[in-house]
């Protein structure tokens, strides 16, 4: 059997981690442009410089500390910001797309930078230069028969919308977002068929993604903003289908299997609770309503969502065409307070003694992918698309420029085998596989460059040094065989 004809093989990236050109071509500042790099393995966090309401300035840990009310993030002249150049897709897109074609990609996932289209988010007119840039990019992909797969928002929002309007807690931001969506749908309706709304929507609960201050101390603000995101996602699906009925519009979640630590019934229950943090978003976007447990939770916390008339109907009508998800590692549901923890994707996990981990502590678990595929398929019966997966690792460039990365090949081979089993033996409907950072990009979690996922190497280090030249790693040739044999040749 194997993968179906037309199965998409490709790779995934995001504008804020790949594109660069942060103020080129009329682009405005995104929140990502005011976040510094960090050092994940040595615990140095990514930071933000802030001007406070009383006129003083401060620097905060992007994730551990909340942005206080009235604070304005700014670019510190003496500090390096990885999104500003990133790995410079902006100036290298033709070369990069040619390399993707050489590997045999049939699809490529990228995001549009909202601030390249609307530099301040609330502009009356879009920025033509920004629109033209993506036209050129999509034309280049289509030239090689590569199907664009577009994430509308990937951990991104215009800084101005956070500072001036308070971010997604303010309903006006939804209107600005819909204006952006309308603009890109109309412009690219004949070039792009596959869309996704919010990247890893389950992680969109902080200042970076929602633009809301006091995100840690004000769960009511967060829940209101999340409501706006979910209504906006549903409106996107509805409007997209009106503009072009052929559009396939999906959601995007970070998936992470949880194992009950043992047969203690309390651990089994803890697993249900742990899984809800993700299931909530999939339920709403696939079924069209908030699950009962969530309504109970909000009530208990005394949080009342402010809705507008018609919102519930929008949620019910705007359910998605497919489920896109990222998958990197798994965790354990434990009721022990002293359970040993390790790092994971934008959160921490409980250690699993059966699994090995990468240099950043993320546990490697191909079987977890088969479990997730089965769970999602059986629960929702919607086509699935793995839109991120991969191994972040340190690569060594040999004197002759070659890069030997058997660790990456092993990781990908085992995960492809697991998804093959899910398709062949379990009957899961899978649309495609898009390994993360198919070309080296900045790490989202740590802001590092040395945490690399790519088949294609980019000469750039953690401090912004490098000439940005591209190189083929061993995994490039391995993945090329995989793409061209539709997943049959995995040697
Ligand atoms: C996901 C994000 C990506 C990506 C990936 C790897 O959470 O959607 O943007 O970066 O994880 O994470 P990291 O870059 O932290 O290694």
Image (cartoon, rainbow, N blue to C red):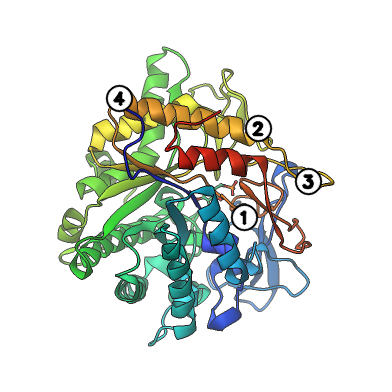
**Closer to the N terminus: mark 2 or mark 4?**
2
- Classify residue 340 by image quadrant: top right
Marks 3 and 4: which is nearer the front? Answer: 3
Residue 474 coordinates in the image, percent (x, y): 66, 40
Marks 1 and 2: which is nearer the front? Answer: 2
**Which of 70 and 162 lies nearest the eye of the viewer?**
162
- Asked if residue 118 lies left or right of residue 95, the reply is left
Q: Residues within 10 Å of mark 1 (few under 14, many from 20)?
A: many
**Closer to the N terminus: mark 3 or mark 2?**
3
Marks 3 and 1: which is nearer the front? Answer: 3
Q: Which mark is residue 101?
A: none
Which residue is label 1 attached to?
441
Residue that sits furthest to the top in the current view: 263
Which residue is label 4 attached to?
426
Q: Are marks 2 and 4 in contact (CB under 8 Å)?
A: no
Query: Residue at the spot x=42%, y=57% of the render?
Result: 146
- Confirm if mark 4 falls within 8 A of ligand 1: no
Question: How far apart are the alpha carbons under marks 3 and 2?
Answer: 15 Å
Residue 108 coordinates in the image, percent (x, y): 46, 55
Which residue is label 2 attached to?
407
Q: Quadrant of the N terminus?
A: top left
Which residue is label 3 attached to?
397
Residue 129 coordinates in the image, percent (x, y): 49, 83
| SS under mark 4 | loop
| SS under mark 2 | helix
- Asked if residue 461 lies left or right of residue 456, the reply is right
| SS under mark 3 | loop
**Relative vertical location of residue 115 with respect to residue 155 in this rendering, above or below:** below
**Closer to the N terminus: mark 1 or mark 4?**
4
Q: Are marks 3 and 4 in contact (CB under 8 Å)?
A: no
């Amino acid at each position: 059997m194997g993968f179906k004809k037309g199965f998409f093989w490709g790779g995934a990236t995001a504008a804020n981690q790949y594109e660069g050109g942060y103020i080129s071509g009329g682009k405005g500042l995104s929140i990502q442009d005011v976040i510094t790099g960090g050092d994940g393995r040595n615990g140095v966090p990514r930071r933000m410089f802030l001007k406070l309401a009383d006129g003083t300035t401060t620097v905060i840990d992007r994730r551990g500390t909340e942005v206080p009310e009235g604070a304005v993030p700014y670019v510190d002249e003496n500090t390096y910001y990885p999104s500003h150049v990133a790995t410079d897709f902006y100036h290298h897109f033709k070369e990069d797309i040619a390399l993707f074609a050489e590997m045999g990609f049939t699809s490529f996932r990228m995001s549009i930078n909202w601030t390249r289209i609307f530099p301040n988010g609330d502009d009356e007119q879009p920025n033509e230069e920004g629109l033209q840039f993506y036209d050129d990019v999509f034309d280049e992909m289509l030239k090689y028969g590569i199907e664009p797969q577009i994430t509308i928002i990937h951990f991104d929002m215009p800084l101005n919308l956070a500072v001036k309007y308070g971010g997604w807690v303010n309903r006006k931001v939804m209107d600005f977002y819909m204006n952006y969506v309308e603009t890109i749908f109309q412009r690219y309706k004949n070039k792009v068929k596959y869309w996704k709304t919010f990247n890893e929507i389950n992680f969109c609960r902080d200042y970076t993604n929602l633009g809301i201050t006091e995100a840690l101390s004000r769960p009511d603000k967060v829940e209101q903003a999340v409501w706006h995101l979910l209504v906006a996602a549903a409106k996107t699906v509805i409007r997209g289908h009106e503009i072009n009925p052929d559009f396939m519009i999906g959601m995007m979640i970070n998936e992470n299997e949880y194992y009950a630590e043992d047969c203690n019934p309390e651990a089994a229950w803890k697993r249900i609770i742990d899984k809800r943090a993700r299931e909530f978003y999939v339920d709403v976007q696939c079924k069209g309503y908030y699950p009962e447990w969530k309504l109970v939770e909000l009530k208990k916390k005394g949080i009342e969502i402010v809705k507008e008339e018609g919102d519930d109907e929008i949620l019910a009508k705007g359910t998605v065409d497919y489920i896109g998800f990222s998958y990197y590692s798994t965790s354990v549901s434990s009721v022990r307070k002293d359970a040993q923890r390790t790092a994971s994707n934008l959160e921490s996990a409980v250690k699993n003694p059966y699994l090995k981990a990468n240099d950043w502590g993320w546990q490697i678990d191909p079987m977890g992918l088969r479990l997730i595929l089965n769970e999602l398929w059986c629960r929702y019966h919607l086509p699935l698309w793995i839109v991120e997966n991969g191994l972040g690792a340190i690569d060594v460039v040999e004197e002759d420029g070659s890069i030997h990365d058997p660790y990456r090949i092993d990781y990908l081979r085992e995960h492809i085998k697991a998804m093959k089993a899910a398709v062949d033996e379990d009957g899961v409907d899978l649309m495609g596989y898009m390994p993360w950072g198919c070309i080296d990009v900045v790490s989202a979690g740590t802001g590092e460059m040395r945490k690399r996922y790519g088949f294609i190497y980019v000469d750039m280090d953690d401090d912004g040094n490098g000439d940005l030249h591209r190189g083929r790693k061993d995994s490039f040739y391995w993945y090329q065989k995989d793409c061209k044999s539709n997943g049959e040749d995995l040697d």
